[in-house]
Image: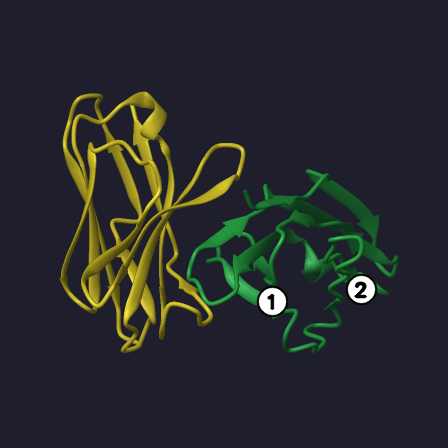
Chain colours: A yellow, B green
Amino acid sequence: DTAVSQTPKYLVTQMGNDKSIKCEQNLGHDTMYWYKQDSKKFLKIMFSYNNKELIINETVPNRFSPKSPDKAHLNLHINSLELGDSAVYFCASSHSFADEQFFGPGTRLTVL
Amino acid sequence: AQRVTQPEKLLSVFKGAPVELKCNYSYSGSPELFWYVQYSRQRLQLLLRHISRESIKGFTADLNKGETSFHLKKPFAQEEDSAMYYCALRRWNTDKLIFGTGTRLQVFP
């Protein structure tokens, strides 16, 4: 009965590949987010979606494309992976845009 | 622009010692301030928020608008408090959380 889940937990891939990270929440929340945590543990928002609509897009390269097929899912697709994309990516959700955010366990992406 | 500063990357104390994790912010409006915690191998979770004015796991934090600070305090640290702590700011009535760079708290036995 995990509230916010992400798959995969670990992802190791070569430069130039395209990969996706999936996020699902079973809390009935309307808003979902993607955050990136770099090697120095700095956590920064990338995107937020409210009811499947993009609300925040924080100067993220357009190689990153979020996709929300429904309110419970927000997937992150990354094209042409670069070394600098190596990080832990966290998904989160909240009931509405100003409520407490619940985080997923994170996906550690390593680009070789 | 809004910014959250946590000046200490690492804070090491012995069990039973008082702890204060510093957080300063810059924002001209009415902010909401939060402390999030990430224990080893666990997900990030909300520890406390300034509007609730409650104590969680012995931790308290008071918003000081004059000093633009929201320091996290605990009078007697426990080993299980060892974790990464993030201070975060949200502009009133928005969903964008701005995180500080985090402080790793190590509590030695």
Query: Picture coordinates of residue B1 (x, y %)?
Result: 54, 42
Mark 1 or mark 2: name the one nearer the start of the chain.
Answer: 1
* Residue picked out by circle 1: B47
Q: From the image, tell me which residue sits under label 2.
A: B74
Q: Position of residue A24 (x, y in %)?
A: 24, 64
Of residues A65 and B21, which is closer to you in this image?
Answer: A65
Q: Residue B73, percent across and down?
A: 79, 61
Q: Is residue B81 left or right of residue A91?
A: right
Q: Chain of mark 2?
A: B
Q: Is residue A75 left or right of residue B91?
A: left
- Is residue B24 toward the left or the right of residue B39 in the image? right
At label 2, the amino acid type is Lys
Residue A3 numbered mark, or none = none
Q: Position of residue A1 (x, y in %)?
A: 31, 76
> Image height check: is A50 above or below A15?
below
Q: Residue at x 72, y 76 (%)?
A: B55
Who's the residue at 68% across and 38% down the image?
Answer: B9
